[in-house]
Image: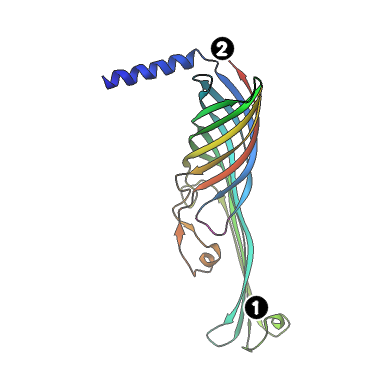
Amino acid sequence: MKRLTVLALLLSITACICHSQVKISVQGGTGLTGITKNENYKANFGYRFGVGVEFPIDQTWSIQTGLQFLNRSYSFDEGVMALGSNEEGEQTLIALYIDSKMNAIYLQVPIKVAAYLPLNDKCGLQFSAGPYIAYGVGGESYLKWLLVTQVHPDPNVDISDLNDSPNRSSVRKGEQSHKTFTKDGGLKRLDIGLGLGVDFKYKRFFAGIGAEYGFLPIDKEFPKELFRYTLQEDQTLVSPRNIGIELHVGFCFSLGK
């Protein structure tokens, strides 16, 4: 009996959708994208564009899906200096500079339930929420670092005079660049999360804001503190998730009667 009731409900919804005006939309936008559980990487502006399909259930409720091409980006670009003594008691200045950027491109399919609140006969607000599934298809990432060490035999030398005093200097640098999604050392391709949004709709045009939070980690071995990890002082690894907020505009039209 329960199975028949569920089947009848699904058939009723399907019939309602099939006889409704299916809406097709084209949209594009930009926003800030970042990751959680990391103290170094900052959010960057990313972009997205795609097509959407909306299946109205009644005048208020509808189901939205589509296909989006989107870019997620986050970077780190800072330096730090430290003054201390080595085993011989010599004054040592260490300067470390790191420049890193992660750039990922995804194909994403959202599945949302939307509710439309009319303001008048031409415009209204539409609220939407639901999961998304994304798959990484491209992107380039890099990590550059520069380590400068200066040693002075006088343990009482002031840091401001260190560069003008006789000292021993060493410079080490490195650079790594790779595809963002690789089997060895790359990010995980699959991302599943939750998306929320609100749009202002006027006739066939709309503009809105959306937010997303990923449920799957992009990497299970991501350094928590990049400076200390590079100096091998702290090897703490975390599993960050994708987060983002974006603004978009678009145009829609109806199919069917």
Left or right: residue 130 versus residue 165 is left
Mark with earlier residue (2, 1): 1
The quarter of the displayed image where residue 157 is located: bottom right
Left or right: residue 252 versus residue 235 is right
Q: Amino acid at mark 1?
A: Ser
Q: Which mark is residue 62?
A: none
Q: Amino acid at mark 2?
A: Gly
Q: Residue at x 52, y 35 (%)?
A: 108
Nearest-to-viewer mark from 2 and 1: 2
In this orientation, which residue lies closer to the viewer: 229 or 114? 114
In this orientation, which residue lies closer to the viewer: 250 or 13? 13
Density class for disc 2 (Cα within 10 Å; few <14, some 14-19, many ≥20) is few
User: Which region of the structure is painted magenta?
Assistant: 37-41
Q: Which mark is residue 256?
A: 2
Q: Secondary structure at mark 1?
A: strand
**Residue 142, image x and y in percent?**
59, 54
Q: Residue at x 54, y 59 (%)?
A: 39
In this orientation, which residue lies closer to the viewer: 227 or 121? 121
Marks 2/1: CA–CA distance: 75 Å
**Residue 139, image x and y in percent?**
58, 44
**Residue 119, image x and y in percent?**
63, 25
Q: Secondary structure at mark 2?
A: loop
In this orientation, which residue lies closer to the viewer: 240 or 17? 17
Q: Which mark is residue 169?
A: 1
Density class for disc 1 (Cα within 10 Å; few <14, some 14-19, many ≥20) is some
The quarter of the displayed image where residue 176 is located: bottom right
Magenta-colored stretch includes residue 205: no
Quadrant (top left/top right/bottom left/bottom right) for the C terminus:
top right
Q: Main secondary structure of the magenta part?
A: loop
